Amino acid sequence: MQAPHSFKIWLIGFMGSGKSTIGALLAQMLGCSFLDTDLQISAQEGLEITQIFNKYSEGYFRKLEKELVSQISQLQTPLVIATGGGLPIFTPIEVGVLIYLCLDFKVLYTRLINDSTPRPLFKTTEQLHALYQKRCSRYDSMAHHRINANQSPERVIADILKRL
Ligand code: S3P
């Protein structure tokens, strides 16, 4: 399958939902480029995401996300984009298709506690659960497609491809 010219596929969803893994594989299958917003911002600032939060603030990080969305939206190339979990909550995405990778909290939580990537917004289990509940309905209402991501990357990708 070939992605149409200037087509943008944005993967959105909570921390640990597999946006980067799925995004890279999906881009490969579609023969287009892949961009991870956290990696892009981190490379641009020369700092890890946690360091950006600590050295500056969450507000500063959200400003960088907003600028990046604006730059990406103007690119005339097909692209698969993995977003940070809070990106679509703070910055509306107006160009392209939004795909929400939806997972059960238990699965996400297990992934996050076993993941070495520090996440500044993961403080306690209760706080994480509250954030999950708050954000899931937001992802749901803005996404064009909701995909059950409680399955293997191959199945998740197959489900996404059926919707495109
Ligand atoms: C965030 C999620 C992180 C990263 C930052 C803030 C959030 O990305 O952008 O720590 O607000 O949920 P992942 O979704 O890749 O963990």
Image: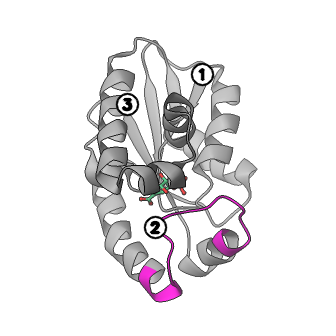
Mark 3 lies on residue: 68
Q: Position of residue 115 (x, y in %)?
A: 71, 65
Q: Secondary structure at mark 1?
A: strand
Q: Quadrant of the N terminus?
A: top right
Mark number displayed over residue 33:
1
Q: Is residue 140 visible?
A: yes
Amino acid carrying label 3: it is Leu
Q: Find the distance from the CA under tag 3 to the CA under tag 1.
A: 16 Å
Specify which label sits upstream in the sequence, 1 or 2: 1
Q: Quadrant of residue 107?
A: bottom right
Q: Is residue 89 magenta?
A: no
Which of discs 1 and 2 lies nearer the camera? The answer is 2
Q: State the predominant SS element of the stretch in magenta.
A: loop
Q: Is residue 136 left or right of residue 39?
A: left
- Cβ of mark 2 under 8 A from ligand 1: yes
Mark number displayed over residue 62:
none
What is the crowding at mark 2: few (fewer than 14 residues within 10 Å), some, or many (at least 20)?
Answer: some
Mark number displayed over residue 121:
2
Q: Is residue 141 above or below residue 62?
A: below
| Rendered residue at 60%/71% (across/down) | 108
Amino acid carrying label 1: it is Ser
Specify which label sits upstream in the sequence, 2 or 3: 3
